[in-house]
Image (cartoon, rainbow, N blue to C red):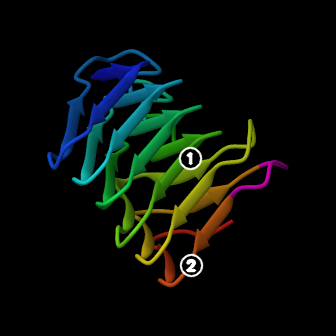
Amino acid sequence: GVEISGNVNSLGTGSVTISGKNSGSGAASPGIFLSSGMVNSTIGNIQIDGEGNTGGALSEGVSINSSSVNATGGSIAVNGMGQDTSGAPVGVGVVNSNIQTTSLGMVNLTTLGGDFTDSDVGGSSYITQTGTFTLNSHQGINFSGTAVSTIATTLGPANLTAQAADII
């Protein structure tokens, strides 16, 4: 997999693409692990694709923990495949983080396998100004705990779809 605990910046027109697959067998082996970092693009799009391992628990496709993903003039797409053996695989897991676009950008979060989870360690925010916010989960969508997370769009719609479980 890919672990990022610093900053990834595109200050020009270029896009940022981060892809990772964890082929290990141990627990806590996500495809992409963004921890206490930032992914930023001033004009281009941001694409983050991750596939967790098939062996152990807590092997999210994409894990975003205490981090920011910001696109000033582009869109953000996060795609995660959770396929661990824990009984509750997570495609995309977000903890105390911000995912935000400004201008015309869209935010698309997709789990290709497993749930989408936003845990209660701290509230997260998902913000678009004039673009659409879309959260599409292969299984369920779980906003858990007592911390408040925010989905905010100024002009665009917000769409949440859980294909095989509840939105809680």
Residue, disc 1: 98
Residue 166 visible in the snapshot: no
Q: Is 61 displayed left or right of 145 in the figure?
A: left
Identify the disc placed on residue 86: none
What secondary structure predominates along the stretch shown in magenta? loop
The amino acid marked with disc number 1 is Asn
- Using the rendered view, name the quadrant where residue 131 is placed: bottom left
* N-terminal label among 2 and 1: 1
For the residue carrying disc 1, how many other residues have a C-alpha within 10 Å: few (<14), some (14-19), or many (20+)? Answer: many
Q: Residue at x 37, y 36 (%)?
A: 39
Foreground tag (2 vs 1): 2
**Residue 2 place in picture, x, y as percent:** 28, 23
Q: Is 96 displayed left or right of 45 in the figure?
A: right
- Using the rendered view, name the quadrant where residue 122 is placed: top right
Whole-number angstrom distance, CA of label 2 to CA of label 1: 16 Å
- Using the rendered view, name the quadrant where residue 16 is placed: top left
